[in-house]
Image: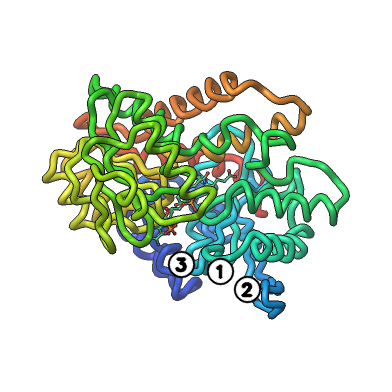
Amino acid sequence: MNEQAQQYVEDFMARLIARNPGEPEFHQAVREVAESLAPHIVTSPILQKMKVLERIAEPERVIIFRVPWLNDKGEIEINRGYRIQMNSAIGPYKGGIRFHPSVNLSILKFLAFEQTFKNSLTTLPMGGGKGGSDFNPKGKSDNEVMKFCQSFMTELQRHIGQDTDVPAGDIGVGGREIGFMFGQYKRLRDEFTGTLTGKGRDWGGSPLRPEATGYGTCYFAQEMLATRNDSFKGKTVCISGSGNVAQYACQKATELGAKVVTLSDSSGYIHDPEGISPEKLEYVMELKNIFRGRIKEYAEKYPSATYYPGERPWGVKCDIAMPCATQNELNGDEAQALVDNGCMCVAEGANMPSTPDAIRIFQQHKLLYAPGKAANAGGVATSGLEMTQNSIRLTWSPEEVDAKLKSIMQNIHAVCVRYGTQSDGYINYVVGANIGGFMKVANAMLAQGCV
Ligand SMILES: NC(=O)C1=CN([C@@H]2O[C@H](COP(=O)(O)OP(=O)(O)OC[C@H]3O[C@@H](n4cnc5c(N)ncnc54)[C@H](OP(=O)(O)O)[C@@H]3O)[C@@H](O)[C@H]2O)C=CC1
Ligand SMILES: O=C(O)CCC(=O)C(=O)O
């Protein structure tokens, strides 16, 4: 980056931080994009005059609301609900809902900001949004989760709609929560529409939506590996997390011929050098999705595995790393450990899991490294396909959806190659995804004037 572009980034970030104090995750996400775009913005009078990046970094609307609900003891509990309606230049706001005690404005704004670029990359007509609550579903009964979801939706319903804002799942929000929220939305609005995605297959959901984020991340990694005439076959893979994205990344990587040796949760990780076979993964799915247990129980069931409490899996030797848990879960030291152990490819299933230091190390060592906004876009892309199926009142077969998902991931990869290939031939997927995602949104904002 030349001096003028560097100065642009520093000035832009100083203003953004002053306007949004105490929001480190939001600053981190915006800085990464500003650094990719600055060389283009400083040579574009129209982007500067129309303040396109400044407007993209300012949410169109932020909704914050009280969520009171009754626990099983009959006591009142109070949580805070949010919806960030970030950008609607290319379609209705679209993005997941996260239920986790760490949820705050900074985290949701970073997620909504990233979502704007990710959704644009899918080529589908979806703007960017994200929402959630500091509600902690862990340890709550089904009844308590339902009461919370109903109260959350009682307020949220007035701000969303199939042509306005279409939420979906994220951390702590899966099929169970979407069901409770959809039921309440339908009751209050008296309409059966595709206002939420990730619905059950029998009531408007798309085949493969649960699988889509993990599968899509593997399809993207396949494309990256192919640029070096390589594939998943015979590779050792480390995955973090053991939720929705991690489970289906593990399933697809295994199907493609790799051996997945780790999974984790916020308490620690398991290492199974023999590999997490389809049968063992079935156990993980039951453990996590039905019994809502902890990953350490895997090591109690399978003697081939060891459980490492309080640790993350990045010290385990692998060829491919797939962080699929949460933001900033892979730091510079861990990135260096992966490099030292011969890792060649990092595909992010989670949103912003690698810290800026970690990304720098991956890129310095010329690893195949793909940021979440490109690699994990298969989830929201399939949500877009669910919206289409809801609108035409038809359901496609799993094979049709899978083919569309694969083609979308291949196209996102091609866009990253187009905008991210450096003069030395190295593909900078961060730059490629940021520029590729920006183009369509920026053009739409320019066409739509000062709104
Ligand atoms: N679901 C989707 O379609 C999409 C999800 N994503 C991203 O993928 C990631 C995972 O989401 P998803 O699988 O849906 O969520 P789940 O709730 O299904 O699973 C989350 C997993 O991450 C772990 N985790 C959560 N917070 C932390 C933390 N602070 N430290 C360590 N581990 C943690 C959880 O462990 P524990 O149970 O202990 O909390 C759990 O294993 C998120 O970054 C999400 O934004 C991206 C695109 C689409
Ligand atoms: O499917 C969706 O709408 C949202 C998925 C999501 O939250 C994400 O891509 O981070």
The image shows residue 405, relative to residue 326, as above or below, that is: above
Badge 1 amino acid:
Asp
Q: Which residue is mark 2?
A: 79
Nearer to us of marks 3 and 1 is 1
Badge 3 amino acid:
Leu
Is residue 1 something one can see in this rendering?
Answer: no
Q: Which residue is mark 3?
A: 16
Q: Position of residue 271 (x, y in %)?
A: 25, 46
Residue at 71%, 72% (x, y): give it: 69
Per the model, the C-alpha gap separating discs 3 and 2 is: 28 Å
Q: Secondary structure at mark 1?
A: loop
Quadrant of residue 443 within the rendered picture: top right
Q: Which residue is mark 1?
A: 134
Q: Position of residue 387 (x, y in %)?
A: 69, 36
Find out whether the residues at labels 1 and 2 contact each other: C-beta distance under 8 Å.
yes
Q: Residues within 10 Å of mark 1 (few under 14, many from 20)?
A: some
Along the line of sight, the residue nearer the viewer: 75 or 221: 75
